[in-house]
Amino acid sequence: MKRRAIISVSDKTGIVEFARVLNGMGVEIVSTGGTAKTLAKAGIPVINVSDVTGFPECLDGRVKTLHPAIHAGVLAIRSNEQHMKQLESLSIQPIDFVVINLYPFKQTILKGDVKLEEAIENIDIGGPTLLRAAAKNYQDVTVVVDPADYAVVLDELQRYGEVSQETKFKLAVKVFEHTAHYDALIADYLRKQVKDAGFPELLTLTYEKVQDLRYGENPHQRAVFYREVLPVPGSLTGARQLHGKELSFNNINDTNGALDLLREFDEPTVVAVKHANPCGVASAPTIYEAYMKAYEADPVSIFGGIVVANRQIDAQTAAEINKIFIEIVVAPSYTDEALEILKRKKNIRILQLENISARPPRGIWDTRKVLGGLLVQDLDTELLPDMSQLKVVTEKKPTDAEMEDLIFAWKVVKHTKSNGIAIAKNKQSLGIGPGQVNRIWAVEQAIQRSGDKVKGAVLASDAFFPFPDCVEAAVKAGISAIIQPGGSIRDQESIDACNKYGIAMVFTGMRHFKH
């Protein structure tokens, strides 16, 4: 009995060449709709699927392959005598190759003005069913969902006359990955059409591979970079690398954190990050001034760090960046002269992210993998519940300049590992105390890192003060105002300490832990 293949593809890349070789090997080709026309036009003999089923394609092509004459030919186990007798009695010929790729649902929803009705019409039904059937019976059926695998299949057929069981199994696994991805993408898109959908009872996430990474957090750990299928404006996955070797796991993680902080600012701002924590943050009238202030905030830690800016990098700024070793620079654009200057450094990575300040759209989730599970939460996109709800809880009120610095420091501490403290003055970060196991240690570290500039600066804490010791340490250092969420049962002790020493304290009513 002749071998038979069913071919029905939306992506016709390489399909004519593939089908021509199969036909040359004596394989009968059954096809549908547009694929059948493409193959026939190329001079390849084609049996229309309706001639196999005895039933015409109908409902505008919605029903073509959903028929026992097709599925029995795919699902019959060749070593099962009863199966083969049933096929013979029903005059059904076995199908040995299933070559299918699906309606372009992803490409459809990526269009900015897509209507729900159009998206629904691009949900494939028969294709996934046929693919899954073939993958289930992989011992007897070669199933191909990716045009990149045509060459592998043809190579084995030409060399050995058949496709190996190992290759068939790999192709079957790829099918189930593909259909799971396809269904997850559909479910995610449709869920987002439901107002206030919340978190689903069954969560299926799907991502696409961007690249294999050299290693993970450490050289002994393997790692891969994936991205969400639907683009998120301003995310690192949309950046274009202009210079330097490929990004590492830690590069990507740290740069993402720097971009999260940068999005808090509208005015010209530079953020420097080291090991996922900000080490220098500054705003100024120009990006050059902002960079210089960010550098001066911590000229030691910025070495080997990551610098992100929300304005074009000019030659003057580039020349300053080149004075030290910087791992990565990210900006919306660069002048030609700035690029030329930066590229003189062999090991610097230069990334361009045009919509660098774009706020994440509503509905974006933050996920953390834990052993055996997954934590999912809304992304922390809020800064304050409402500026009008800021509550001055002390007798002394902050000046306008202090309030500006308090908000600046609050933005910085939001993106600092907890327990986190940020000290700032004149829209420049000074000392930052990240990731301490108690708050007083974070305060002491931030004060120590601030040096003499601490006098007259302001302090932000990502969570409330459990004791007045933090206030006392701040006062002793010369801090003039404090911002914190409030909410401790001992808040009054900290308020009393501020009143005693004559400094201002503001409660935000919102906590920003970052673990």
Image: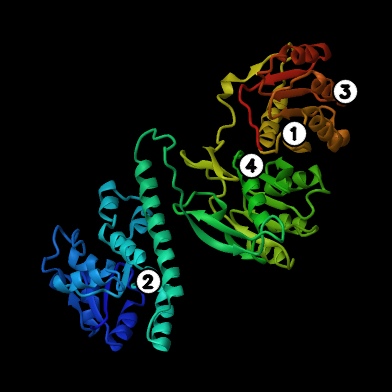
Evaluate if marks 3 and 1 touch, with contact meaning CB atoms under 8 Å apart: no
Which residue corresponds to the image point at 64% horizontal and 31% vertical from the top-left?
512
- Can residue 279 be seen in the rendering of this structure? yes
Q: Position of residue 401 (x, y in %)?
A: 71, 27
- Residue type, label 4: Leu
**Does 347 sit above or below residue 194?**
below
The CA span between labels 3 and 1 is: 16 Å
- Residue type, label 3: Lys
* Quadrant of the image containing the C terminus: top right
Q: Secondary structure at mark 3?
A: helix
The CA span between labels 3 and 2 is: 76 Å
**Residue that carries the numbered disc 1 in the rendered image:** 422
**Residue that carries the numbered disc 3 in the rendered image:** 476
Evaluate if marks 4 and 2 touch, with contact meaning CB atoms under 8 Å apart: no
- Viewer-nearest of labels 3 and 2? 2
Q: Secondary structure at mark 2?
A: loop
